[in-house]
Amino acid sequence: IFEHVDMEEEDDWLDYLRDLLVQRRNVVEEKKWLMEMRDVVTPRIKAQLDQIAHDDLLRSVVETTAPTNSNSVVADTNDLQDANIPKDDRVKEEDDDNILPLYMETLTLLRNISNSGQWPKTSMARSRVIRSPATATSATANSVVASSPSSSSTSTFKGQLSHCGSFTVVNENIWSTEDDRPLPLGNTLFPDLVKSVFQLESKIVRSSSSPPTSAADDADMTTIRPPSTHCAINCNAEFTPHVDNGRGQGQSLSMIVALGKFGQKSVAGRSSDGGGGGGGLFVEGTAYDIRYNPLVFDGWRQRHWTEPFVGERFSLVWFTPELKKKKKTISSDNNGAVEKKMGEVKSGDHDVSIEIQQDSSWKRDEDLRAEELVQAHALQLPSYPPLLFRYNSTDALVINEILDVDGKSAYEWKGALGNCFTKDDSGSKPSNGTMVDFSPRGHNCVLDIGAHIGVFTRYALASGCNRVIAYEPEEDNLDLLRQNTKPKKDLQKDNERNHVGKIEIRNSAVVASSQNGFGTLVRARSRNDGTSNTWRHSLEEYSQYVDREASSLPSQLQEATLTRSRVKTIPLFGNDGAIVPGVTFVKLDCEGAEIDILLSPNAREYKSWRDVTHLVFEWSFTKEKRVDVFHRAQKNLQDAGFHVFYDGQGSWWDTEPNVIWPFHSDLVVYAMRTNKSS
């Protein structure tokens, strides 16, 4: 199944790409640049060109190819099953007469498209949570092995080679044309299918013989579900445990149903016990038979994945996402432009110099959402004034990631683990459906590395933590961090009656070195639209930004020469390190420094982590793109006693050899262990 993935933010990657195109000043940097162009940038460009060529080919095929009779598809599928499926695997026997008439038209159209070779290529963003076709359970997966050499530097999902993939269409009756959004390719290629799937949704929600069931506690099944704007259409795709990006607009709940002739797959080390004997949907560890049995669930909050299967399996997922509006840009001239100035903003006892907007209509959607979250957070932490942040900066993105507790807080994992731990051979493993509440709640002392302006530090306090040690090397962020972690004056002398917590702020960068020292911090370049980039500052050896000629920049709102400063550094491990006795929860977000930290010999030693039982970190794939290197760090943590898990674990990019990270964003990773002293 696929329960929708929004298009990922590409601004940072585009800035990074432009920086790579600048001529480096010495041979070492030039060699590094050429290698990155060869192994990363060029494959990405080629993948995009391949996508365009594939789409053009599909258009021409649709225009010249007559529909294929669906009976021939069934015959082909049966031949493949007889040849390739072990005797222990069972495919549901199915005659067309046994299919509910409700689904016959849609299933026939799906089979025609799949059999004719017209199935669209799966987008990279969506493939992030799909298993490799070479190891997936579709009957045709064996055809991929010879077609995907492990030595290739181009890391792309090979689903189209084995009739495995996913694409999305929209309901044109209610699709908004605001901001000139184009129709998806699927709408252009398959208008009959688009009409059929949305008519099917309407029939399902009104059906008395086969009404949808619910896996969501808050689902109102007494009212008729409104029409969805989107439908994800999947063919033989096995999705790994994940939650969907974004939030549902209005209805918030997704509805899924599976069609076709599929059954149980026996895979060593992976559960084959599902709600319907293969191809079911796991929602937070509970299996549901969705074969002609529609299910409503909350894909934005409930972790879900596909049960292993064999045979022909299609699935449809209807949903209505929250769509991002186009960004407003601020003109650099004085003709009607919004005036911006530096000013003093007061909040309680706090004074801090931040950039403010004189016209609230120019606040970005992210800023408006951040304001709402800040107000809600203030009620949870009454001992502190409302959190301060800078408008027209990435501060709002940090707030939205961490404080959106009704959605998905970035550094928490709530719910089932799913069939994770595919690379953990250390002994006992959590079973399918093990429930986890990974958060700072219940931890007495939290270590916040890369504290930024104090959003996570405050979040930990609001969760009941008594002590937070926060590290932040960048001065502007540090100023706001100090302001945001200063309790109200009338409560500072009364810690007994009011939970204000103890916060220790350290003005240092955390590194892999074994001793204290100094380093050069590089401030991140602003984005093309002038948004101040406050969360990508890093030590020079990990920075993705370089100095450039002003004329080569895509925007006059960007800085040509980067700002550098000398900062203190401290090791994570050791007697003088950041991890001190009593710390049980660590948040590690240090813009590339985590790579050397987690690859160091200390990282694989149990004792190096002292009392730590919970670790969450952001692995900077934008700086180190070899997935094998990430797996080395993962192995170090497993040697230190941690179970490691993350969204997309077991997907194609996580299991195939020599993969170069093909996505534009980094990966949040969670690790848990039991303290031997407990």
Image: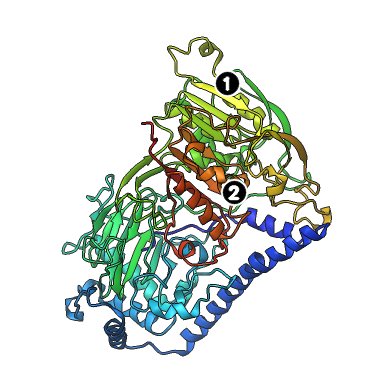
Looking at marks 1 and 2 on the same chain, the residue that comes earlier in the sequence is marked by 1
The numbered dot on residue 595 is 2
- Report the number of numbered marks: 2
Residue at the (55%, 68%) spot, across then down: 155
- Visible residue check, residue 191: yes
How dense is the environment of label 1, judged by Cα within 10 Å: few (below 14), some, or many (20 and up)?
some
Q: Which residue is mark 1?
A: 486
Q: Quadrant of residue 474?
A: top right
Q: Residue furthest top?
A: 493
Up-down: is 15 above or below 436? Answer: below
The image position of residue 283, as x and y in percent, is: 30, 53
Q: CA distance from mark 1 to mark 2?
A: 32 Å
How dense is the environment of label 2, judged by Cα within 10 Å: few (below 14), some, or many (20 and up)?
many
The image position of residue 95, as x and y in percent, is: 19, 80
At label 1, the amino acid type is: Lys
* Left or right, residue 606 beside residue 534: left
Dot 1: element: loop
Quadrant of the frame with the N terminus: bottom left
The image position of residue 369, as x and y in percent, is: 52, 40
Residue at the (47%, 70%) spot, across then down: 122
Residue at the (28%, 60%) spot, across then down: 271
Dot 2: element: helix
Quadrant of the frame with the C terminus: top left
